[in-house]
Image (cartoon, rainbow, N blue to C red):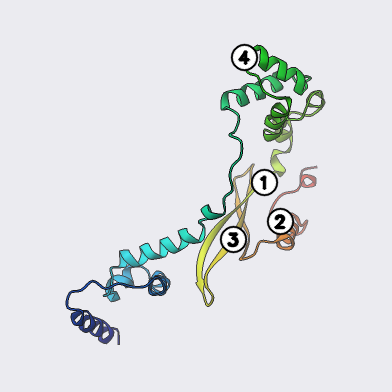
Amino acid sequence: MIEYLREENRVLKQQLGGRRLRLTDAQQRRLAAKGNALGYRVLSEVATIVTPDTILRWHRRLIAKKWDYSAKRRDAGRPPVMKEIADLTVRIAREAPSWGYTRIQGALANLGHRVARTTVAKILKQHRIEPGPERGKRTPWSTFLKSHWECLAATNFFTIEVWGLRGLVTFYLLIVMELSTRRVHLAGVTPNPNTAWMMQMGRNLTAPDGGRVPREDDFL
């Protein structure tokens, strides 16, 4: 059957008389969906209209187009504060934990950088630094991490594209890594990671019987 279809394609190409075959976007999508499922090795044996590299390039283009949000991006607004000023603001806040926004603003002015008080507040908020004098009353982040390292975990998503009856579907895979052991767990897979699903994944991971992420009371 495959040999017959390949021969039929050769006959049709001969009928074109050497003219270049031009496919519509819909035709390219159909070939990309079917071809990606076959893989490069099988395509090398059966593809005759276009090369396997072209078919797989069309598939990569489809995935890239799906994740292209350039048309939805908005104007970024005011340009960000220069990195030099931001770094200096963070350094002053950490070295003088009792200083508030106004004193940090004054210190920056003495160094030749005139910024608004709201700008100082914005920079510290972006770096998750509390306003003074609250900073001096809190446990340093490094101390907190050291004391809770055995029961901390990092989570992240990655995606995989799957062709289904309704076209190209994105599946989200939630992974969790124990920081102390670097052990990685696959928490779940879903095409729709909504709030209810995330809450259930949290219950599954921290359940006392069978949970994959260690809890703080496991070490007490």
- Amino acid at circle 2: Leu
Foreground mark, 2 or 3? 3
Q: Position of residue 170 (x, y in %)?
A: 55, 64
Q: Check contact, mark 4 vs mark 1: CB within 8 A.
A: no
Q: Along the polypeptide, which appears first: circle 4 or circle 2?
A: 4
Count of numbered badges drawn on the protein: 4
Q: CA distance from mark 4 to mark 2?
A: 51 Å
Q: Check contact, mark 2 vs mark 3: CB within 8 A.
A: no
- Eyeballing the image, is 203 above or below 131? below
Residue behind mark 2: 205
Residue 153 badge: 1
Q: Secondary structure at mark 1?
A: strand
Q: Position of residue 136 (x, y in %)?
A: 79, 23
* Residue drawn at x 57%, y 50% as measured from the top left: 73
Q: Check contact, mark 2 vs mark 1: CB within 8 A.
A: yes
Q: CA distance from mark 2 to mark 1?
A: 10 Å
Foreground mark, 4 or 2? 4
Looking at the rendering, in which quadrant would you find the C terminus? top right
Q: Along the polypeptide, which appears first: circle 2 or circle 1?
A: 1
Q: CA distance from mark 4 to mark 1?
A: 43 Å
Q: Along the polypeptide, which appears first: circle 2 or circle 3?
A: 3
- The residue sitting at the top extreme is 110
Residue behind mark 4: 112
Horizontal side of 204 relative to 5 (left or right) equals: right
Residue behind mark 3: 172
- Amino acid at circle 3: Tyr
* Residue drawn at x 17%, y 74% as measured from the top left: 18
- Amino acid at circle 1: Ala
